[in-house]
């Protein structure tokens, strides 16, 4: 499996996991100028921007650690642009789904 296939597989698993956690997955791989949102969900009345990170090994650190300050800043900017178009009054939260090896975890309100 190449990296693109691994990424799609990880995002598929993450979407199923989010649905099992009670989220309503509205969109995946949303492209907006300046970046991409892995998943846009609703958790109750809250619009949730979800970043999915996968690490097969710990060679480069954990999957959560890969969501660094630069990535968080990009996601905040992209999410603000997206929300301004689709839901200007929405309350937004940022969650991260990590896949470390075979372990899947949800980090609510990650940043």
Image: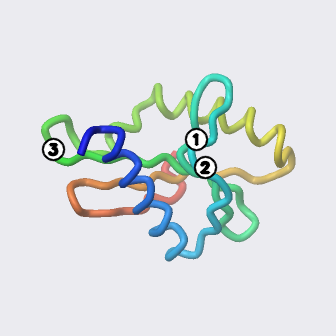
Q: Residues within 10 Å of mark 3 (few under 14, many from 20)?
A: few
Q: Which mark is residue 58?
A: 3
Q: Nearer the viewer, mark 1 or mark 2?
A: 1
Please tell me whether mark 1 sits on a helix, a strand or a loop: strand
For residue 85, which quarter of the picture? top right
Q: Is residue 64 left or right of residue 72?
A: left
Mark sitting earlier along the chain (1/2): 1
Residue 62 drawn at (x, y percent): 25, 45
Residue 88 drawn at (x, y percent): 85, 44
Q: Residue at x 46, y 52 (%)?
A: 96
Q: Which mark is residue 37?
A: 1
Q: Which mark is residue 12?
A: none
Please tell me whether mark 2 sits on a helix, a strand or a loop: strand
Residue closest to the eye, 61 or 13: 13
Mark sitting earlier along the chain (3/2): 2
Residue 76 drawn at (x, y percent): 62, 35
Residue on which disc 2 sits: 49
Q: Is residue 87 left or right of residue 77?
A: right
* Quarter placement of the N terminus: top left
Q: Is residue 91 left or right of residue 29?
A: right
CB within 8 Å, label 1 to label 2:
yes
Mark sitting earlier along the chain (1/3): 1
Q: Residues within 10 Å of mark 2 (few under 14, many from 20)?
A: many
Label 1, label 3: how far apart the Cα atoms are: 24 Å
Residue closest to the eye, 49 or 108: 49
Residue 38 drawn at (x, y percent): 53, 45
Q: Residue at x 83, y 48 (%)?
A: 87
Q: Residue at x 51, y 67 (%)?
A: 18
Label 3, label 2: how far apart the Cα atoms are: 25 Å
């Amino acid at each position: 499996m190449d990296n693109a296939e691994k990424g799609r597989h990880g995002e598929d698993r993450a979407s199923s996991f989010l649905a099992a956690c009670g989220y309503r997955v509205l969109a995946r791989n949303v492209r907006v100028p300046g970046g991409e949102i892995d998943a846009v969900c609703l958790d109750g009345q809250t619009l949730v921007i979800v970043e999915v990170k996968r690490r097969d090994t710990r060679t480069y650190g954990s999957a959560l650690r890969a969501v660094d300050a630069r990535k968080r800043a990009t996601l905040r900017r992209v999410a603000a642009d997206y929300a301004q178009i689709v839901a200007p009054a929405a309350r937004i939260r940022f969650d991260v789904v990590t896949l470390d090896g075979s372990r899947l975890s949800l980090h609510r309100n990650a940043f």
